[in-house]
Image (cartoon, helix red, strand yellow):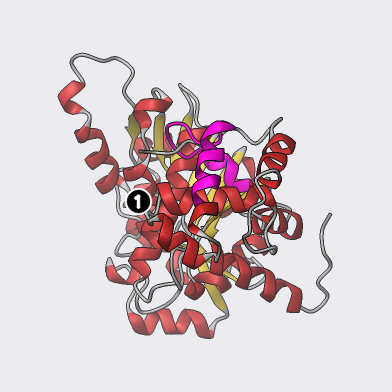
């Protein structure tokens, strides 16, 4: 059974009273609505048994069963998880307040964060897909960035429930997973007129030379797509790191020595292949001359920029992106959210936003 969480507006008081009235014997460090959310997520999304949930929280198995039953009765659970209800996590609210975000969605950690970064990306990809399924509307325009976590969001999003969405790539090098998505719809293309579509920049994210990149950017076709990319309603972007195991290194656009050189220059991360420092300032680098895509400054003109990134190894990069004001929405995992808040509180001159 898949779970769907009710919208966050209008029912929180009812939800809190529902849990309180059930005399749950669980831990007191979470609000009643967050406890109900946590139990539902573990059961329906992580597919843990009620015994496993009881040991994890900890609470009695009977209390877990009562919470799951209550979740169904109050309408929190119906068909699939509505990512808006992840807003009930206190961490989400704290991220919004501290960093001035429009929305922040924290995916609960299943276990202590695994060493496999791909597993973390997959989990955050599911959270990003739930966000997209909840927020996108038919005929919406979605700008798509570059990277593994973004590709996982696209693969996991149920565009059939959203309606037709037009996707535009924000950089080169994105066509691989978009074309895979589009080809998956080809079997029903003859019967339906509401399928999503995509406009792709026909180039890599990094050209081999700066002169080649400049020539490609002058091509009318690429200029037209870049113009469309700057005018989308939503943008979905990942946050990269200048490390030897980064996607941009694995793809051959950067080598390990060059990545180390970026770190020596104060680079902490990148979005759309454009690198920035801990304060969110774009660093002047020769590699940017080889890049094909919209600029980070262009993100300011897009109504909602959704960043999907997590893992403790990415917290410095995510923090730099937040300081730069590049993101309106952050989808991340629990341990990363905790570390981001800790790092920000230690930052010299930090003042909490309200």
Q: Is residue 295 visible?
A: no
Q: Residue at the location (51% across, 40% down)?
A: 69
Q: Position of residue 230 (x, y in %)?
A: 53, 39
48 is higher (above) or lower (below) than 175: below
Q: Is residue 269 visible?
A: yes
The answer to which of 94 and 273 lies nearer the viewer is: 94
Identify the image quadrant of the C terminus.
bottom right
Q: Residue at the location (55% across, 39% down)?
A: 71
- The reply, left or right, for residue 177 in relation to residue 69 is left
281 is higher (above) or lower (below) than 265: above
- The reply, left or right, for residue 183 in relation to residue 203 is left
Give, as a single range, the part of the protein colored magenta: 64-87
Q: Position of residue 141 (x, y in %)?
A: 47, 30
Q: Position of residue 317 (x, y in %)?
A: 55, 69
The answer to which of 319 and 292 lies nearer the viewer is: 319
Asked where in the image residue 344 lies, by quadrant, the reply is bottom right
65 is higher (above) or lower (below) than 29: above
């Amino acid at each position: 059974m898949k779970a769907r969480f009710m919208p966050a507006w209008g029912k929180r008081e009812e939800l809190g009273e529902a849990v309180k009235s059930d005399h749950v014997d669980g831990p007191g460090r979470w609000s009643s609505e967050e406890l109900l959310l946590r139990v539902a997520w573990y059961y329906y999304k992580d597919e843990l048994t009620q015994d496993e949930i009881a040991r994890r929280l900890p609470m009695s198995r009977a209390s877990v069963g009562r919470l799951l039953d209550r979740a169904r009765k109050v309408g929190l659970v119906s068909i699939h998880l509505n990512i808006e209800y992840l807003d009930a996590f206190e961490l989400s609210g704290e991220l919004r307040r501290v960093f001035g975000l429009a929305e922040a969605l924290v995916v609960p950690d299943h276990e202590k964060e695994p060493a496999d970064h791909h597993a973390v990306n997959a989990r955050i990809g599911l959270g990003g897909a739930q966000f997209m399924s909840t927020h996108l509307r038919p005929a919406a325009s979605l700008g798509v960035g570059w990277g593994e976590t973004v590709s996982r969001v696209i693969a996991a999003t149920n565009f059939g429930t959203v309606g037709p969405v037009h996707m535009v790539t924000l950089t080169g090098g994105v066509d691989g997973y978009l074309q895979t998505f589009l080809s998956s719809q080809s079997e029903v293309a003859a019967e339906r007129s509401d399928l999503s579509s995509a406009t792709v920049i026909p180039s890599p994210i990094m050209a081999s030379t700066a002169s080649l990149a400049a020539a490609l950017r002058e091509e009318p076709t690429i200029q037209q797509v870049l113009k469309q990319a700057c005018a989308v309603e939503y943008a979905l972007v990942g946050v990269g790191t200048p490390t030897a195991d980064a996607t941009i290194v694995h793809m051959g656009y950067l080598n390990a020595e060059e990545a180390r050189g970026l770190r020596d220059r104060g680079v902490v991360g990148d979005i759309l292949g454009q690198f920035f420092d801990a304060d969110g300032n774009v660093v002047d680098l020769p590699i940017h001359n080889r890049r094909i895509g919209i600029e980070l400054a262009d993100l300011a003109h897009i109504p909602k920029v959704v960043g999907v990134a997590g893992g403790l190894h990415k917290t410095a990069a995510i923090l730099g992106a937040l300081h730069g004001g590049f993101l309106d929405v952050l989808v991340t995992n629990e341990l990363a959210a905790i570390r981001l808040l800790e790092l920000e509180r230690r930052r010299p001159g930090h003042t909490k936003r309200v």
